[in-house]
Image: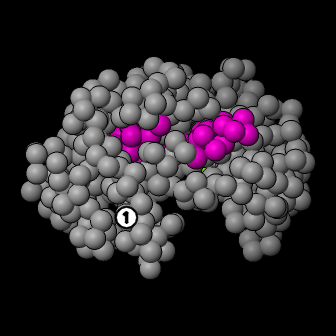
Amino acid sequence: MKITSVAAALLEPWPWVLIKVRTDEGLVGIGEAYHGAGVHNIAVDPRLTERALIGQDPRNVDKLFRDMKNSMSASGFYQGAVMSAISGIEMALWDITGQALGTPIWQLLGGAFRDQIRVYNDCNEGDNADDPLSWAAKAKQVEARGFDAIKFDIDPRPTQRDRYNRTIRNTDIAFFVDVVTAIREALDPDTDLAIDAHWRYAPADILKVAYAFEKLDLLWLEDPIPPENIAALREVKVATRTPICTGENLYTRHGFRELVEQQAADIISPDLAKAGGLAEGKRIADLADSYYIPLAPHNICSPIGTMASCHVCAATPNFHVLEFHHLDNELWNSLTVERDLIQNGRIDLPRGPGLGVHLDEGVARAATKQDVGGFYA
Ligand code: MG
């Protein structure tokens, strides 16, 4: 079997990037790359397709992953938009391989530890951002829809004194504590609550918040400080009982190595549509497992990337919970032929060959802003 073409589609309004890999035997694989400027164009760039993919056997997934990296070695090959494009193509190669062998991808990754993938819903903030009870009401609504894990954001308030020095004023700390306490008290004690700080704070300042959160038994506090300094993050992690989660801005096992080896986070959150795809996601998970660190993948993908991530979540002993961002986005629910993939905060593990779900071509085409390489050919 040989690869004959690679195509990509950029959707709207949410800029999902879908990837198609075609073969000379008629099998077509689909994947999703983390969105970003030009990612759909990178995926069909001849330096990737002509040098590494066209004419090659798509079932040699790991070899082609290496070849794609090497072919882009002068273009920041190990991170950023290039690695996002490579990640989406890698997913499509697994889809082809699974179809060719008549087996789901999770089977090829070592087999399943679980039949269902637990999903948490990202709620962002309350409908009235200034009212803690509004945040709590939103949490209750999402919990009533079956989710037993929920996340909210504590981004800098409009009242922040200076957005460049990363400090938090006392009234804003008090507000964050009021909001998160209100949410926590509204939820069932066994519903997990995570809080995301989006890299915006200084260690000493976010620690004041983390200390106040300790009695609330959070699932985690995510990205408390900027992502590029592992030593600083480790200082935060060891200083508080509130679990610390990070990882959505890291790429490949090499990007996670220092974070894991320094044990600078309690939970890691790689985004499999940018960090290197499915096999690389499994390697990152295994690296983390050697330090007993659970995996909670970041995910804002369409159902294609979400379901691809589920295969890694199934085949990973230390999987904890998978992110979900599109609760009332009708396009998310209609983009695959299979509908209502999330039931009671869980996704049933696909049983069919390859990815196990199928793109609704008509829905995708109607939502396509730009396609390259003959995505709908
Ligand atoms: Mg996040």
Identify whether 82 is placed above or below 61. Answer: below
Q: Is 39 within the magenta? A: no
Ligand 1 within 8 Å, label 1 CB: no
- From which residue to which does the magenta span run? 284-312
Q: Quadrant of residue 190?
A: top right
Residue 19: horizontal and vertical position, in percent? 28, 55
Q: Is residue 169 visible?
A: yes
Residue type for callout 1: Met
Residue 128: horizontal and vertical position, in percent? 61, 46
Q: Residue at x 59, y 41 (%)?
A: 285
Pick the residue in front: 170 or 26.
26
Residue 334: horizontal and vertical position, in percent? 27, 38
Picture colour scheme: one colour
Q: Quadrant of residue 66?
A: bottom left
Residue 134 lies left or right of residue 15; in this view the side is: right
Pick the residue in front: 5 or 196.
5
Q: Residue at x 75, y 65 (%)?
A: 229
Q: Is residue 134 visible?
A: no
Residue 237 lies left or right of residue 249; in this view the side is: right
Residue 275: horizontal and vertical position, in percent? 51, 55
Identify whether 74 is placed above or below 314. Answer: below
Helix, strand or loop at disc 1? helix
Pick the residue in front: 329 or 365.
365
Pick the residue in front: 156 or 70.
70
Identify whether 197 is placed above or below 371. Answer: above
Name the residue beneath numbered marker 1: 68
Q: Residue at x 79, y 31 (%)?
A: 217
Q: Crowding at label 1, few (<14), some or many (≥20) Cα neighbours within 10 Å?
A: many
Tally the numbered discs.
Answer: 1
Q: Residue at x 24, y 29 (%)?
A: 102
Quarter of the image for the C terminus: give it.
bottom left
